[in-house]
Amino acid sequence: MDYLEIEGGHKLQGRVNISGAKNSALPVIAASILSDKPFKITNLPNVVDIRTLLKLVDMLGGKVEHDNTTAIIDNSSMNSTKAVYEIVSQMRASILVLGPLLTRFKHCEVSLPGGCAIGQRPIDMHLKALEAMGAKIEIKGGYVQAEAPKGLQGTKIVFDKITVGGTENVIMAASMAKGVTTITNAAKEPEIVQLCELIQSAGVEITGVGTSELSITGTNGKPLAFQECKIIPDRIEAGTYLCAAAIANSEITLENVESNHIKAILDKLESMGCTIKIEENAIAIKGPKKLKPINITTSEYPGFPTDMQAQFMAIAAIAQGESIIEERLFENRFMHVSELNRLGADIWLKGSLAAVRGVKELNGADVMATDLRASSALVLGALVANGITNVRRIYHLDRGYDNLEGKLAKLGARIKRKKE
Ligand code: EPZ
């Protein structure tokens, strides 16, 4: 198994290119199922989750040509509607094929994704919405078995709580349904906007894009023909490199980044004492000598993203004073706390609150990655910890960070991938 060996205490400098957003690329790939024409996607991040979903499309009978950042997907001869456990269990986002398979083929079987390290992560809202659109759904043998022999019917969907994946599944299902589907309390993340724009590129009418009220007029069973799609920059990868500069008291520039997507992150970094300069498609950041403490509550976009909570906890660990971080989206997204404490952080947990008392220094140790963003928080801590930190179980990192060690090494970090 691979691990990262990081020698702390080296400043970063230079420019880093931000890859395409994993969480935008995944629904875009799932949406390819709605099309019976070849469809080109560019600016894909070179990460395991993308390869996993492309493998699922291939197993469903799609033809996939993929190099590191580009895929051409031809689902004209897709001949299976079963998303098997072996793939879905590797990656929860595979549930995104449910809406497209059902609306295009009128039946499908998708393995239940189950829980994961950050929480239970049920899919009840996805299922309830598809049932409201006329699907008959049963859970049998660990699979969601769904059918809608006459096709899905547009209707009014009101989500009890904001769900990114649920909104994406319904948008895709609605795009080929009969009539109009409205979604109230829709998620409005930039990744949702990209999905809507992709579907609009096939001539489907969607109103309210970027708001919490969406209205989608379906094609009544006619498959879609998309224009080429360039994946938006990964706002969480960008946030992670900004945190790297902040924690390492360094000056770096991010390229190919969309500053409008990360306003909440930039605001918190400025409050902590970072100097930020926004340029065209680029952001320059200078970390302060001493970071100020911060209070953070995670929330849906445009609020502070849960996917940046762990990284900010790492930088708060060496701030001057006490920070309070509240996790409101996932019930178990604090697995990095005990590992950061192994590096010498002083973090206390009570329910969904973490109190982070800033310490003067961190010290290298063996630590274990527990989920994708927790892994990057450990790497951030390691950048400034005295001596060597070994970050183990980095298969979590490989799921969502494109060449993290290569990009950090180019910025001057001492980081090496090694084998156990
Ligand atoms: C997406 O997950 C992201 N994944 C996550 O990023 C991100 O943390 C999350 O949104 C929140 O921003 C992808 O985009 C592939 P949700 P998703 O449905 O869609 C509850 C990362 O690190 N819920 O918005 O699964 C759920 O348990 C990942 O890149 C239900 O109760 O998240 C959670 O508490 C991790 N029932 C809340 O809603 C449902 O049917 C928000 O989840 C669906 C969700």
Image (cartoon, grey):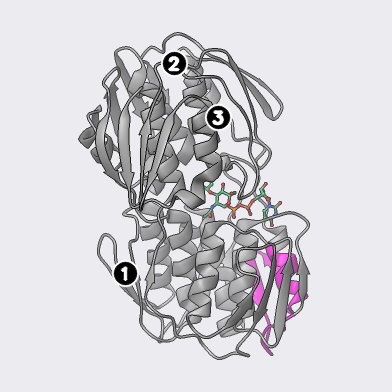
- Along the viewing direction, whichever of 74 and 306 lies nearer the viewer: 306
Would residue 107 be visible to someone looking at this image? no
Instruction: Point out the tag, 3 or 2, that comes first from the N-terminus.
Output: 2
Q: Mark 2 points at which residue?
A: 290
Look at the image and give the residue range highlighted in magenta: 126-154
Q: What element carries label 2?
A: loop
Hey, what amino acid is under mark 3? Met
- In magenta segment, residue 131: yes
> As displayed, is residue 277 above or below residue 180?
above
Label 1 environment density (alpha carbons within 10 Å; few <14, some 14–19, many ≥20): some
Q: Mark 3 points at which residue?
A: 335
Which residue is pictured at 48% across the width and 69% down the height? 30
Closer to the eye: label 1 or 2: 2
- Residue 312, horizontal then vertical, whole percent: 51, 30
The answer to whether marks 1 and 2 mark residues whose Cβ atoms lie closer than 8 Å is no
Q: Name the residue under label 1.
A: 71
- In magenta segment, residue 25: no
> As displayed, is residue 79 above or below residue 234?
below
Q: Is mark 3 on a helix, strand or loop?
A: loop
Q: Is mark 1 on a helix, strand or loop?
A: strand
Closer to the eye: label 3 or 1: 1
